Image (tube, rainbow, N blue to C red):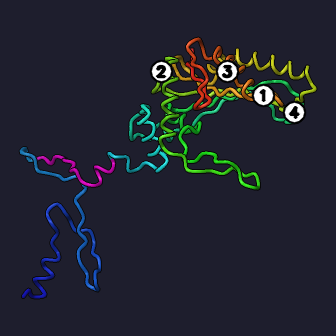
Amino acid sequence: MKTYQEFISEAKKCWPGYKKKGTQKLFGKTYNRCVKEDIEELEESSGGERSGRRTRGKLTLARGRGADMSKSERTTAAISKKAGLKGTGKYSTKDLRKKSRDYTTYDSEDEEDDYGSTEQDHFIRTYSSARKAAKGEQLIKKFKPAGRTATGMTKLKTAPSSESVRRVKDLKKQMTKAGADKKGRVHTVDIMHRDSGVGKGDKDGQMERGRNFIAAVKDTPNQLKKAGAKKGEAVVGKPTAVMPGEDKKTGEAKRAKLYKKAFGKRSTERSAKTGLMVGKAD
């Protein structure tokens, strides 16, 4: 039978590869808390100098597997990898944490000046990578609409990750067709009217706004340069109907043709999966 001193002496020891890190109580008794060695071990070299050797401990491996990534970042990285977009690295957060940069031609400080205006404005958002753009443009999302409640609120249900992968794959396919750089920045272009109150009866106002929209689309390459876009970088647009009462599908089809011209001859067709058109900055 072991004496009390022998029991205490053995309790102080840890298994090979483990080290003491504090104590813990179990059934009213105090024991050493043994954990795996996860720090750099220093060894004496043959020349008498100390050289550093990193172990394959828990801490080292955890860093290599993106332990500092948030759940959202990990999801974005995993889905993008499955779709073929690697960003700046599978577990890199540099592009995911970089804030998007916005550029707009709208400079009015007085909203009253915009009443009845037929002017069109550019809104260009620059993402640091394609996977950051996929997340920002909601191609990667956890929920999707599932009808409406009795009060008119939108119901949401969990969207399968496979659906997000399909959307991101579609974005990558469009970027490849357009010849855009898949590892470079992505610029999203929206052209918006200042006043949406131009009614059906105001035909002159509608025609003028239509002409201004065409002029704004033609001016898109110039505005992209001002926003900092460089040759070869991806340009994404989401054509939408802009006239009150305009048929949504017809309006989107018309504007898709204009967006295609703005993004260059190699721009792809509007995607049925994502609603996006992708080209490249010339």
Cα separation, mark 4 vs mark 3, equals 23 Å
Q: Which numbered disc covers residue 263?
A: none
**Separation of residues labelled 1 and 2 (CA atoms):** 31 Å
Mark 2 vs mark 4, CA separation in Å: 39 Å
**Residues at badges 3 and 1 in contact (C-beta under 8 Å)?**
no
- Element carrying mark 2: helix
- Nearest the viewer among 194 and 33 is 194
Report the side of 120 relative to 221 (left or right).
Answer: right
Q: Name the mark on residue 197.
A: 4
Q: Are marks 3 and 2 in contact (CB under 8 Å)?
A: no
Q: Residue at x 87, y 33 (%)?
A: 197
| Rendered image quadrant of residue 201 | top right
Instruction: Indicate whether 127 appears above or below 174.
Output: below
| Magenta-tinted stretch | 49-63
Of badges 1 and 2, the one in the foreground is 1
| Mark linked to residue 256 | 3
- Front: mark 3 or 1: 1
Residue 133 in the image, given as x and y percentages of width and height = 55, 34
Q: Earlier in the sequence, mark 1 or mark 2?
A: 2
**Dot 3, how many residues are within 10 Å of its Cα: few (below 14), some (14-19), or many (20+)?**
many
55 magenta-colored: yes
